[in-house]
Amino acid sequence: MTDPRPARLHALVYGTGALLLLGHALWLYLMGDYPSILLPVLLTPLMLLAALLRLGQEDHARLSAYLVLICGYLLIAVELPQQQGPAPLWLGLPPVLTLLLLPLGPAMLLNVMLVPIWLMLLGDAQLSRDLMLGYLTLVVVAGLAPWEHLRQQALLRATDPRDPECPAINRLTLKDRLYSECERANLLDQRLAVLLIHLPQLDMASEQFGARARQALLDALCAEVERRCRDHDLLGREGQADFWLVLPDTSENGAMLVRQRLEESLQRTVLLETGPIETRMALCLLLPHEAPEHFEQRLQTRSLRLTES
């Protein structure tokens, strides 16, 4: 589910920027610089609009970022030519601001395209070789931080055993853990049961009520399974609407009790959009000395029957 905290933080930052612009306009008024008051006064409502858009739907996040970026560009474009001496601070603001507000690719492209404009606004009197090299270095170095952040996120997604949409483990990890439990059960002469769970409401919830209803359905299922099962039981997502609950060292009677508890608990769980959670469940037991590959094939065949029934 989408975390609202980043949106609130961005809206707070945008609102603070609007207050700073208003304070800057008041300071210009007190200093008697009346011609310069117009720009911060006009930019203040745009910053407030950006803050309100950021608090709205997630689709408006990019629009609010562009509004803030436009306000920053206009303010820098007006202040940069008025600097009497070298202005590395004002010249360094555009690339940093762009990287903070836009994704890495568009931000780097926009920074490179705007280099002639910022250098032209700086004027020939202040333009020097060292200042130009410093600006280009800042554009490159400032992009290293978001690039490393994206690399770490990609590495985390590649190694994270959990499913991207819910707390259940993903399909690849589920297969590895299932094979390990099969080998362990055969080696120690223990029993192994797998409860197959199909959510027929999942596609309907996504099509009729949107992503939030789909996410609520997934979260409710995972929460009930975690509440009703043991710590070493494994819930994995085998397909879009198919889950496998691996029950190590569990007899058929024990697995039937788990299935009954889950069915009763899920029927009592009522969601706002979809109502009571409907599930189709089936139970599969590992046969004595059965190969993990054969057991997995039986599970997939049974899951397909649940989906088609």
Image (cartoon, grey):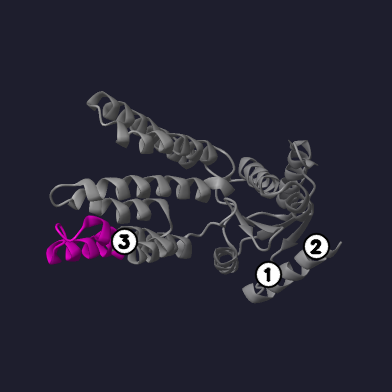
Q: How many marks?
A: 3
Question: Which contiguous range is marked in magenta?
Answer: 116-143
Give me the C-alpha separation between circle 2 and circle 1: 27 Å
Q: Amino acid at mark 1?
A: Pro
- Residue extending furthest right? 309
Q: Which numbered disc covers residue 307?
A: 2
- Residue extending furthest front? 35
- Residue extending furthest top? 30
Query: Does residue 159 appear anywhere in the picture?
Result: yes
Q: Which numbered disc covers residue 117?
A: 3
Residue 216 within the segment the image draws in magenta: no
Q: Amino acid at mark 2?
A: Thr
Give me the C-alpha separation between circle 3 and circle 1: 75 Å
**Closest to the observer: 37 or 7?**
37
Image quarter (top left, top right, bottom left or bottom right) of the C terminus? bottom right
**Closest to the observer: 143 or 19?**
19
**What residue do we see at 14% from left, 47% from top?**
84
Residue that label 1 marks: 288
